[in-house]
Amino acid sequence: MREIPRLEGDLPSLLLSRDRKGDAERAAVLEAVVLAACQRARARGSRDPWLPHTMLGAAFRSGQLDAIEAVVDEVEQGMHWNLASTLTDAPDWIRHAPEHLQPDLDAVLARLRQAAGAP
């Protein structure tokens, strides 16, 4: 059973894409909740295969480079189908991340693409 439902990780992106008044603030609160839930699941020894990917997405969207570095190795070594999904979602995450962090996030995405053998 997944400890972090997929929608919880996707909802901040959906809010940012919708871009209505208050959506950015709602997304930021949800990112904090998602990261806290992921950290708790990790501390409890969760074996959820989506946990590193969910953490990576939340960290990307909020521009938390330290959190990205904490899980990027696991994501690189994860199951191929998980990584493919992450590579599909990551450009949107970068678009919604703080602008000054986007070049660093692009570099992480390039690293993940290389690990997956993707163009």
Image (cartoon, rainbow, N blue to C red):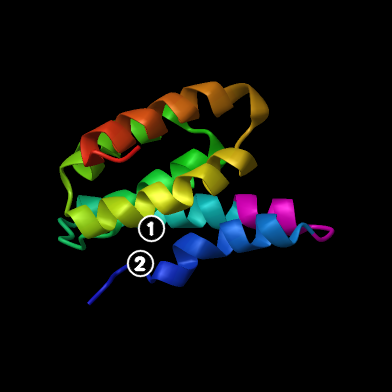
**Which circle marks residue 37 in the picture?**
1
Q: Give me the residue at 27% from left, 72% from top.
A: 2
**Which circle marks residue 99 in the picture?**
none
In the image: residue 73, left or right of residue 69 = left
Does the magenta segment cover residue 25?
yes
Q: Give me the residue at 32% from left, 37% from top.
A: 113
Please report whichever mark, 2 or 1, sits nearer to the chain's N-terminal start: 2
Residue 92, given in percent of the width and then of the height, sits at 56, 48
What residue occupies the far bottom of the structure in this picture?
A: 1
- Quarter location, residue 12: bottom right
Residue under numbered circle 2: 4
In the image: residue 57, left or right of residue 38 = right
- Quarter location, residue 34: bottom left
The stretch in magenta equals 20-28
Residue 6, given in percent of the width and then of the height, sits at 40, 68
Local packing at callout 1 (Cα closer than 10 Å; few below 14, some 14-19, many 20+) is some
- Tell me, yes or no, whether the two marked residues, 2 and 1, touch with CB atoms within 8 Å: yes
In the image: residue 54, left or right of residue 114 = right
From the viewer's perspective, is residue 103 above or below residue 8? above
Q: Give me the residue at 72% from left, 51% from top.
A: 24
Q: Is residue 18 visible in this depiction of the protein? A: yes
Residue 57, given in percent of the width and then of the height, sits at 44, 48
Residue 101, given in percent of the width and then of the height, sits at 57, 25
Circle 2: residue type: Ile
